[in-house]
Amino acid sequence: MKKIALIFLLALSICAFSLNLVCAAGAPRLVDQADILTSSEESQLLSLLNEISERQKMDIVVVTVDSLGGKSPRAYADDYYDYNGYGADGILLLIAMDSRDYYISTTGYGIEAVTDEGLSYMEDRFVDDLSDGDYASAFTTYAELCDDFITQARSGDPYDRGNMPKSNFPWGQNLLISLAVGFVIAFIATAIMRSKLKSVRPKSGASDYVRQGSFQLTRSNDLYLYRRVTRRAKPKDNGSGGSSTHSSSSGRSHGGGGGKF
């Protein structure tokens, strides 16, 4: 009897493990139907997408297709996410090669993490790579931005209008370059001016530089050196921010947006 129970538990465990494999295989986070990535690029990108998705408890997905099959980019992206076994919270980037469309579909917590303003920020950072055909770089940037935006949203202050990521500016490097360029320009300018003053000789007193009778005072007035000015900051219109949403064919609520590359 114990052997039968043990065999039954073992069989049940194998079935559960097999079911998990099927579910995982049914919802890959990288689907390169258009075959625009090399094998090594696919492997690296899939590892990144899986690591971020599992750590953030959300599905971060990239899908490339040759054609949208008559659907709009939004409908295709929403339906692909809804009908292919992904979780309740996620972000999907769709690329259609025939029409050169891209679309980011968000759902669940993805809608809160990637606002309309946040979406524009993300697009500005990976669409140029799409246009240049550097797809692996574009998808890596997208995945890393999703990770950053989700982390920020979970802090209680999602990236949105008036609260976007600060760009890293190389102040030290640019300061040195500016100083070097300024020094070179100043050196050239002073050298040119000195070359034009070969006939000029220094004078011993200030009066030697004044031409007799050249100064005539024709008008005078008082000049106030100080004044008090009260300034009031004009309120900025930051709008409501947040994410625009719509319902997909499955009835699920989605956010997102896209364009051409």
Image (cartoon, rainbow, N blue to C red):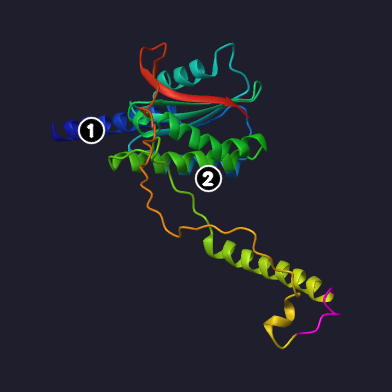
Q: At label 2, which amino acid type do we have?
A: Gln
SS at badge 2: helix
Based on the picture, tell me whether residue 97 belongs to the magenta stretch.
no
Circle 2 or circle 1, nearest the eye: 2
Mark 1, other Cα within 10 Å: few <14 / some 14–19 / many ≥20: few
In-front residue for pair 155/163: 163
Image location of residue 255, percent across then percent down:
41, 23
Residue closest to the far right: 199
The quadrant of the picture occupied by the C terminus is top right
Snapshot quadrant of residue 106: top left
Q: Is residue 114 shown above or below 231?
A: above
Residue at the far bottom in the pictured view: 204
Closer to us: 125 or 64: 125
User: Does 201 lie within the magenta span?
Assistant: yes
Instruction: Compare residues 162 and 111 and report the one nearer the observer.
Output: 162
Secondary structure under tag 1 reads helix
For disc 2, the marked residue is 44
- Relative height, residue 256 to residue 3 (above, below): above
- In the rendered image, residue 88, in percent from the top left (x then y), is placed at 33, 26
Q: Amino acid at mark 1?
A: Ile
4 left or right of 225? left
Taking the spot 64% from the left edge, 33% from the top edge, the residue there is 36
Give the overall secondary structure of the magenta segment: loop
The residue wearing badge 1 is 7
Instruction: Tell me, for residue 210, which label it has, or none.
Output: none
Span colored in magenta: 196-202
- Residue 211, how many percent across, how many down? 76, 74
